[in-house]
Amino acid sequence: MRMPRFSFHIGLSTTLFCLTSIQGLYAQTPTFLNGERDVVNSSLTSTEVSHTGVRGPIASSEAKLPVKNGIREVIPQKYKERYEEWKNEFLAAETGRRQWELYEHNDAFMLTIMISDEDKHGAGTSKYMWDDNGKLIAATIVLGSRINEGYPNPIYYPVMNALAPDATAAMVKNNVLAAAKIAHEFGHVKQVAGMDGATYRLQNQLIPLYNEILLKNGRNTKDPRLVELAAKMGGTPVEIWEDREYWGEANAMLFLRDRITDQSAHRELFGRINRSVALYARDYSERFEQIK
Ligand SMILES: [Zn+2]
């Protein structure tokens, strides 16, 4: 059964799996950035200040590192071994390899990947930066230090939840779960890169405003002010959040399609995913149905 939307929203800050969600619903105005490469360093610091709830903050010393385009992996020594295992698992699937190479060889984009001890089983993508033309030029993925464990709920994470051990223990190793979480985050980057930066920032600006009114008006979503805000943003905050999360999940599903090659395991896994999508994400089923 689907959770009532509003109570879900209220409980969100304690039940979230993905940091993107926190950012999407509660972030303050994201920083507008100049497209010049040489300002990216200083901008990293200002972005840090402008966001709330960001895990694994970029230390000021790190912000002074030379700018590197492509993929920048900031992994503490103690986590290097497990990180390499997760990454290799992600790269073992064609979807993972293709997406990794896309960013690795992109001289106009910097993807930073970090590991954090906070929210060990979760992950999140934040610190998006755009140039003056609205083109995404940077993003940071923060992985929990134990993303090889922990299955998020089937309502908003129908793909990752389908890896839960009761049905798939024999066919899926823990690193597949970790790699699926990496794929989910790559899905967020892909989605944001594919949309207009101004729209994304507008959503993040108006969402807190929407929520503030909602909390004071007796939770009346028909309030003309909220209707107007939703029209400007292209949806209610929860709809926007769902849309973002389900794009992450669709990318995790692409990864699993390529990675789970055993036919019966594939059938069972995709059966579980499709059942959860039909139950909880029917409005978004099209994006999952395309993946077989
Ligand atoms: Zn997510």
Image (tube, rainbow, N blue to C red):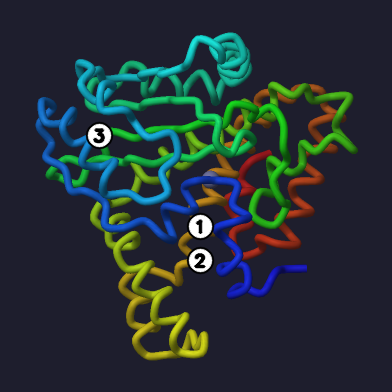
Q: What residue is at 42 percent from the left and 56 percent from the top? A: 24
Q: Which one is earlier in the sequence, the residue at label 3 or at label 2?
A: 3
For the residue carrying disc 2, how many other residues have a C-alpha within 10 Å: few (<14), some (14-19), or many (20+)? few
What amino acid type should be assigned to the residue bearing mark 2?
Glu
Question: Label 1 near label 3: C-beta < 8 Å?
Answer: no
Label 3 environment density (alpha carbons within 10 Å; few <14, some 14–19, many ≥20): many
Q: Kindly identify which numbered label has been placed on residue 137.
A: 3
What's the CA distance linking mark 3 and mark 1? 22 Å
- Number of residues whose C-alpha sits closer than 10 Å to that of mark 1, classed few (under 14), some (14–19) or many (20 or more): some
Could you say where residue 155 lies in the image, as x and y percent from the top left? 69, 57
- Mark 3 within 8 Å of ligand 1, using the beta carbon: no
Residue 66 placement (x, y as % from top left) = 20, 16
Across and down, in percent, residue 264 comes to 87, 30
Q: Secondary structure at mark 1?
A: helix
Dot 2: what SS?
helix
Kind of element beneath mark 3 = strand
Residue position marked by numbered label 2 in the rendering: 239
Q: Residue at x 42, y 90 (%)?
A: 223
In the displayed structure, 144 sits above or below 232; it is: above
Q: Evaluate if marks 3 and 2 touch, with contact meaning CB atoms under 8 Å apart.
A: no
The residue type indicated by label 1 comes to Asp
- Residue type at mark 3? Ile
Q: In the rendered structure, are the residues bearing label 2 and label 1 in contact, judged by CB atoms less than 8 Å apart?
A: yes
Decide if residue 73 is on the left or right side of residue 18: left
Q: Give the CA distance from mark 2 to mark 1.
A: 6 Å
Q: Which residue is disc 1 drawn over?
A: 243
When asked about the image quadrant of residue 56, the answer is top left
Residue 265 in percent (x, y) is at 84, 29
